Amino acid sequence: MFKYEENRMYQMPVYFGPACGPRSGPDGERLYKTGPQECTQHILVYETEAEKIENYFPEGFSVRKPYIIVTHKMHRNLPWLAGRGYNVVTFNVPVTYTGKEETIKGKFQLSIWENHADPIISGREQLGYSKIFADIQDMHVLEGKGKASLSSWDFRFLTLDFDLNKAPEDEELLKSILSDPEDEGLMHYKYFPHTGDGFSDADVAYVTISPNGKHCLPDDLPALPTPERSWCSGGITWFRPTWEDMPTQYHVVNGLADLPVKRIIGASVVKLQHYNDVYDQRVVK
C-alpha cells in the first residue's frame, strides 16, 4: 500500500514515490551542491499602455511602470536535469500588488512559455508559474544579429530579434527599468480548477512570489563569475493565431499581441551562472 514519506516532494502520479525535480534530487536533497547552472538571456523592453495591461490583472495588481519585459532564456547544465537544458520566453511587467496583509512592489509574470514538459509541470504545480508549452528556437546569432521564433502546432506566433551592432533606443531608461531598486521579486497567479461541477470553480487561486535575495542558499558556495552583459537594440513581431491554429493558446497570444508597442526602449544580452532553485517560493498574503 502506497504511503507518503514525510518531508518529500510529490507530483502526479504520486504512488510511485517521491518526485525528482528542480528542488529535490533522487534522495530528496537539494542539488545546488553539484554546481551552478548556466543561462543566456536576451531581454527586450518596450513601452505599452498601462490601462490595457491592467485588463489582464487579477484583483490587487496595478501597473507600476507601463513596460513589458520580454526575456528569451537558454538554461543549460541544469543539475536537476542531469546536465540537460531547455528554453524559456517570459513576459513580465513592473507592478504593485496589494494583498490582505502585504503590499509588494515587483514584477508580475503575464505568461511564460517553455519547451519541455518537466519544467512546465513542476513549475505550475509547485511554484504557481503560468507555464505553457511552445517550440522555442535557440537564439541564433550571426554577425551580431540574433533571432528566435516560437511556435505551437507548427504555427509560428512570435519572433524576437536582437542587434548587438546597434545601441539601445534609450539606454539610460533601459538600465533603470532592468535595475529597478524597488523590485522585491517576481509574482505569479496560481490557479487550479475544481474537478467536476462545470470545472469553473477554483481549488487553488492565489498569488505567489519568487523573492529577490539569496534564495535560501548557504553562504559557503563557490563564488560565481561576474555576469557578462551587453546593451543592444531589438524587436518583436507577433503572428496572430485563430482558434484552429492554436486551440488552447490563441487567446493568450492575441491578448499579449493586443498590448501596443508604443516604442522599443532597448535590449540586453546577459550570460551568467547561478545556483537558484526557487526553493524560497511562497504565497503572498
Image (cartoon, rainbow, N blue to C red):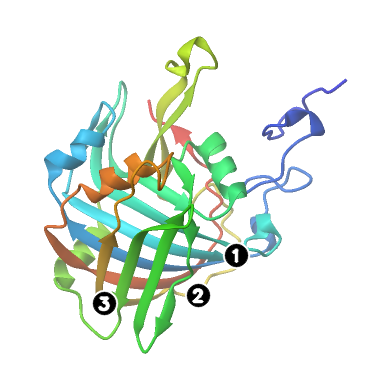
What's the CA distance linking mark 2 and mark 3? 22 Å
As helix, strand or loop, the secondary structure at mark 1 comes to loop
- Look at the numbered discs 1 and 2 and tell me whether their residues touch, using CB distance below 8 Å: no
Residue 145, position in %: x, y? 34, 82
- Left or right, 284 with respect to 261, comes to right
Instruction: Tell me the residue at 49%/10% (across/down).
Output: 197
Q: Which residue is mark 2?
A: 225
Label 2 crowd (10 A; few <14 / some 14-19 / many >=20) = few
Residue topped by disc 3: 232
Left-right relation of 196 to 19: left
Secondary structure under tag 2 reads loop
Residue 18 in the image: x percent, y percent? 75, 36
Q: Which residue is mark 1?
A: 36
Tell me, yes or no, if residue 94 can be seen here.
yes
Q: Is residue 280 above or below residue 14?
A: below
Residue type pointed to by label 3? Cys
